[in-house]
Image: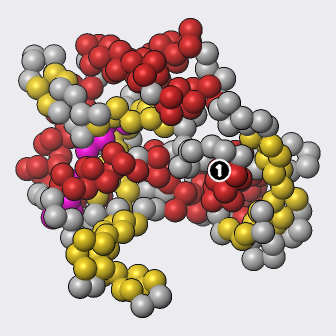
Amino acid sequence: MLIFKDTKFIKSPFDSEAELEQVIVDNYEYLFGPDSFYLPKTLIKTGDGAGTIPDGFAIDLGQKKWFVVEAELGHHDVWNHIAKQVSKQIVASLQLTTKQKLEDISADMYDKDEYTKEKFTNLGISSINVRKVIRDILQEDPIIGIPIDSIPNDLKDWARQQRHKVKLWIVSKFVELNNVSNIVFEFPEEFKPALDTEEESKPPKANTEIAQYEVELMDLISANLLKVYDKLLMTYKPRNGQQKKYEALVLDDGSLEVLGQTFSAPSYAALVGIQDAGSDRKTVNGWTSWKTSDGQTLADLRDKLLNTATSDN
């Protein structure tokens, strides 16, 4: 249950898979990251011409990864529905004709959608290199991305047996008590999957007791990689705006104080800054945005923590 003043929201099932699909389309960045853009449903075919239509594709420019996306409901049969459907989609996605189609759609989005274009610009990707960047990303194996409302055990077991990496995110729906038209959706913090076979399969060097998604600022403080009352810096220039600098103060509970507000996660702290600068972006990666006085990002410190934990073990 979620409570806002006198209003109560009760966890409820999605009305249909289509409802979940639309929620993902509207909020894809909270799963695939702030440097991602989302390609809509499109028909793709296997080598022998069998057609299939995934719920979409996501391309993460920052991490240079791409996803075949299939939103699912947890009560659907794993073997006769989910596994069967996704297997066909993966086979079709590996075809050269599919990759060419996705490249064309991506280039068209870059030309016509300013929000998408800004993501390329922020990463220093010029218009002349757009197709090359997309083509290089699509040369890698796709990741199976499944947003779902609950995860059956069989789905976990199936995911861990796949040659392609699989990420499962839980998305929940809450409806106001006695007012079914008022709905809120819960997404994972910091883009964290509930199951990530890519993380699970990493070699021992990165396979510590602390997974990357689980690292918090308090872990960096405890490891003396960050100190209470340290100041973190972020510079941001929105499209057609002036560059601004922001400062975050590290508090003793691992939160960040920015512009008079306190945030439990670096990405929220960064988001309030870039929106103050005039950006209309919904998400930002705070781990790469905030830097220490000597120029290290929080992601750099996180990597040091994970590698230190490995050598200690």
Where is residue 279, by image quadrant?
Answer: top right
Q: Magenta part of the protein: which range?
A: 67-75
Q: Does 91 sit left or right of 5 as displayed?
A: left
Residue 198 placed where, x, y %?
46, 45
Where is residue 97, by image quadrant?
Answer: top left
Which quadrant is home to the N terminus? Answer: bottom left
Residue highlighted by disc 1:
275
State the predominant SS element of the stretch in magenta.
Answer: loop
In the image, residue 191 above or below residue 257: above
Nearest the viewer among 120 and 102 is: 120
At a point 29% along the width and 34% down the height, the residue shown is 40
Residue sticking out furthest to the bottom: 6
Residue 215 placed where, x, y %?
64, 61
Where is residue 14, by image quadrant?
Answer: bottom left
Q: Does 51 sit left or right of 89 as displayed?
A: left
At a point 18% along the width and 51% down the height, the residue shown is 18
